[in-house]
Amino acid sequence: MDKKTEQYDVVIIGGGAAGLTAGIYCGRARLKTLIIEKALVGGLATYTNEIENFPGFPEGSTGLGLMELFHKQAKKFGVTFKLTDVKAVNFDNDVKVVETFRVNYEAKAVIIATGGKPRITKAKNEENYLFDKGISFCATCDAAANTDKMVIVIGSGDAAIEEGMFLTRFAKKVYVSVIHDEGIMDCNEIAKEQAMSNPKMEFLWNTVVDSFEGEGHLDTVVLRNLKTKEQQPVKVDTCFEFIGYEPNTDIFKGIVDLSEKGYVIVNELMETNVSGVFSAGDTNEKFLKQVATAVGDGAIAGVMAEKYLAENEVFYHQILNAEKPGVVFVYDATCELCRELLPIVEEMAARSNGAFRLTKVDVYKSKGIARRLGVAGTPVLVFVKDGKVDRVIDKNITRDTILNELS
């Protein structure tokens, strides 16, 4: 079956908080933008009953309600949505290809926002209680909803113990299921000492989850002792699982740089190692995974995708335009020497009566074009001829240098 092909300025893979925010920024920049989401628009946040720490909502919001607002805002700016699964990607060329079962989507820029998923115990009946039915993966999100209730934490790493201690501010009791012998945990020693001295925390050593039970909503976690094989039912209102997190990045292996744990490696501009490909949100190697941080990542990725496309236009249609010779003055607006030389360059270009095309590139705003020209530092003069870089002057540029070279 021959696949259809559709063209977009930007394709965003993933429709969670990061992807939706990136879409809002791209759509508002009047870029033809597509968001591909395989499941539910809004991502993991839609499974959170109550979000009370997202700025601007003093009364809190449901995760689904908040993500519906994000979705509505993205559509307002003309973003297109496709509910389908991405099968493969090809980022080898300037035009990127995002492949689904029926359609190949071509894009000038791609934003990865595929998020991730918490690791689960895979115990019996677990799938019946995930997210809003008694199993949570975010104490920050759901602690307040468990005020004066009984909860259990699965895990003993830094995240599990620190989140467990946070839960003691709200819950009546916090059980902690630990796979190790008594006194042994995977967290740091300071957190361990604090947790073991916390009167609200009770540790259940040598245990793993055997099953989850409850009518419609979780009310019992059945633990199994690894040594005695004895089963221990624990009555709780909520189970918090902190046994790791897995990014949804399998289709990007060998295509963009990933960390040992499979997270996308980006710089502060959300740029991957592949030109024109950005990544945002829980897909990235980062410290804090929250809706607020995903929004920040998405905003940066959206702005940088728009800037990348604008720089593409300048680079290919102005700088490398073969109709006439070109001169690129690469400078930094914060550099005193650059500021002194800029008007001299402009004056010489005016005097040339169109003999060459002048392009001014301020690296303070973005280093994208400078990187494409293969130059670093400022000030730099780049001479372009027949659509190619002819020569570069990047050392000891003075007023006399400019007068001699551009006269």
Image (tube, helix red, strand yellow):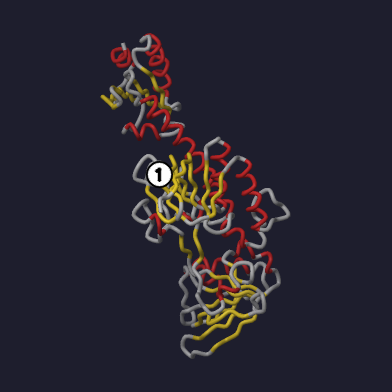
Residue at the right extreme? Answer: 59
Q: How many marks?
A: 1
State the residue at coordinates (59%, 40%).
78
Which quadrant of the view contains residue 142? Answer: bottom right
Which sits in the foreground, 143 or 70? 70
- Looking at the image, residue 128 lies above or below residue 353: below
Residue 31 position in % (x across, y down): 52, 37
- Looking at the image, residue 209 lies above or below residue 349: below
Which quadrant of the view contains residue 359? Answer: top left
Which quadrant of the view contains residue 168? Answer: bottom right
- Given the image, on which type of amino acid does mark 1 rest? Lys
State the residue at coordinates (68%, 69%).
146
State the residue at coordinates (56%, 57%).
43
- Looking at the image, residue 406 lies above or below residue 360: above
**Local crowd size for mark 1, using a 10 Å CA cut-off: few (<14), some (14–19), many (≥20):** many
Residue at the front extreme? Answer: 1
Q: Which residue is mark 1?
A: 96
Which sits in the foreground, 5 or 263? 5
Which sits in the foreground, 316 or 329? 316
Q: Is residue 293 left or right of residue 181?
A: right
Quadrant placement of the N terminus: bottom left
SS state under label 1: strand
- Looking at the image, residue 160 lies above or below residue 52: below
Residue 71 position in % (x across, y down): 62, 49
Q: Is residue 151 left or right of residue 322?
A: right
Quadrant placement of the C terminus: top left
Residue 4 position in % (x across, y down): 45, 47
Which sits in the foreground, 281 or 128? 128
Residue 350 position in % (x across, y down): 40, 11
